[in-house]
Image (cartoon, grey):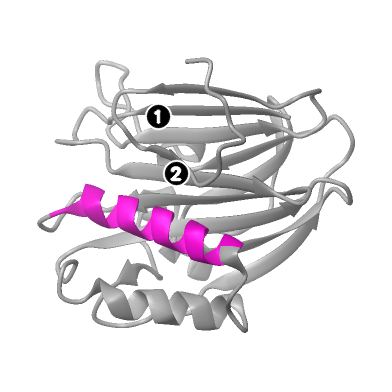
Amino acid sequence: MDVSWISQKGSSRDNNNDYVAVGENNNHFYAVIVDALNKGKSPGGLAEYWAKTVLTRYIQQQHKSVLSLLKEIHSSLIPDYLTESASYTLIDIDLTKRSGTVVYVGDCRLGTGQSGNINWINQPHILVNTFPELGNSYASCLTRVLKARRFTEPDQVNFNWRPGEMLLLCTDGYWLPDSDSQGGNRDDVSVLKLRPDDPGFTLHVDSDCDNFFSVTGLLNSDK
């Protein structure tokens, strides 16, 4: 399996507030990607905390359901992250069966396929999906977000992929680019590219900040 994490700060952002945590165990690969909104005292802190905590606790398998786990972790956001909010997506994929589950709030997405021919698995929680007549100018208006003051229930989607296909787990800066007049993307652009059928286990990280975390010692970076 080949794993590649690419992440760059957007031109209108003070910091790169995207984060990903990954792990592998018993022929399953897990990842949590978080895209914190550019507001609050510590958006990057929320992204890192949520990704690391959810992924670590999920892999421990000491919960009745993913919903109960997320509610429990959500209760720990107070008082440190009262002013922050974020989108996130958790994936749990069975490498043997080529199947998996997506659990998400907001606009981080999972896609399968090949470059230029991506099938997006989950529909983002954005206003234009509720009111299509509003047009793409409302594509960045979120209808569900992670925030400390109220728990937002995630959606869950099951999926499969074909032999040889790539999986893309990304923030909206990747799947919905928003360029400025100089051609740069205003939002942070991050994508985790997975090639499950590649032999061995390799990892490459190309990021402008420290926003990648592995919960196991099985992943060896070649960056």
Asked whether 112 or 68 is in front, the reply is: 68
Q: Nearer the viewer, residue 85 or 117?
A: 85
Amino acid type assigned to the residue bearing label 2 in the image: Val
User: In 3D space, how far apart are the residues under numbered discs 1 and 2 (Cα atoms)?
Assistant: 10 Å
Identify the residue at horizontal 48%, vertical 79% (top origin).
153
- Disc 2 designates what residue? 20
Q: Which mark is residue 7?
A: 1
Magenta-drawn stretch, dominant element (helix, strand or loop): helix
**How far across and how far down the image is residue 209, in percent?**
29, 28
- Circle 1 crowding by C-alpha within 10 Å: few under 14, some 14–19, many from 20: many
> Range of the magenta residues?
42-59
* Residue drawn at x 75%, y 63% as measured from the top left: 158
What is the residue that sits farthest to the left in this orientation? 41
Question: Is residue 45 shown in magenta?
Answer: yes
Instruction: Label 1, secondary structure: give it.
Output: strand
Q: Nearer the viewer, residue 145 or 34?
A: 34
Decide which of 100, 127 is in the foreground and name it: 100
Labels 1 and 2 touching (C-beta < 8 A): yes
For the question of whether residue 152 can be seen, the reply is no
